[in-house]
Image (cartoon, rainbow, N blue to C red):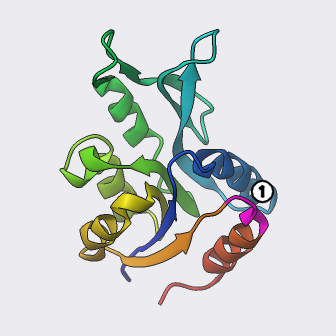
Amino acid sequence: MSRPRAILLVGPVFSGKSRFIEDLSSSLGAAGFAVAGFFQRGAFRADGRKIGYDLVGLSSGSCRPLARRSEAGDRWLFDDAAFESARGEVREDADLVVIDEIGPLELAGKGHAKAVDRALSVSPTVLIVVREALADEAVKWLSARADVIRVCFEPGRGDEITAEIREILSSKTS
């Protein structure tokens, strides 16, 4: 079996990467591609203040709390069961498995690291979202296990990036 491909979607914090993942998944599904995995959606109070992130399964549609700010607001509190749920969203029959997103926890072998490992072991193509500041470290972390294709996300480039990912999915693995 050839090495899996990891498409690393790199972009600034709060640039719309997760919203793009929602749109991309719908577009690819409509084009006949099976998409699995998950994305993280911001969770907000009624007054608009961000309180954390929810984990949304792309194939199941399930939504559960992943992280919440502590009462003091000085740290994140994670739900370990949500990380287990994320691993369950990685499907072997998918053309593309999406992991949104990896950060310091994953690069230290925690958080979604097991979901990334599973995705790279069962899917020929995995799309992994990462913020710009961690991109070089993420490339190093992934390169030992996959051929990394770096795609730069910028607002307004959604159609272009979608076309690029469709082309990658349509090509045969080497």
Residue type, label 1: Ser
Q: Could you classify mark 1 by the number of other residues whose Cα lies within 10 Å: few (under 14), some (14-19), or many (20 or more)?
A: some
Residue 69 picture location, percent across and down: 37, 19
Name the residue nearer the viewer: 50 or 105: 50
Name the residue nearer the viewer: 114 or 107: 107
Residue 47 picture location, percent across and down: 63, 10
| In magenta segment, residue 101 | no
Residue at x-position 64% and y-position 63%: 154
Q: Is residue 83 left or right of residue 7?
A: left
Residue at x-position 74% and y-position 72%: 160
Range shown magenta = 155-159
Name the residue nearer the viewer: 51 or 89: 51
Quadrant in which residue 120 is drawn = bottom left
Q: Secondary structure at mark 1?
A: helix
Residue at x-position 68% and y-position 79%: 167
Q: Residue pushed farthest left?
A: 108
Q: Quadrant of the N terminus?
A: bottom left
Q: Is residue 14 left or right of residue 90?
A: right
Residue 72 picture location, percent across and down: 30, 12
Quadrant in which residue 145 is drawn = bottom left
Residue 78 picture location, percent across and down: 31, 25
Residue topped by disc 1: 27
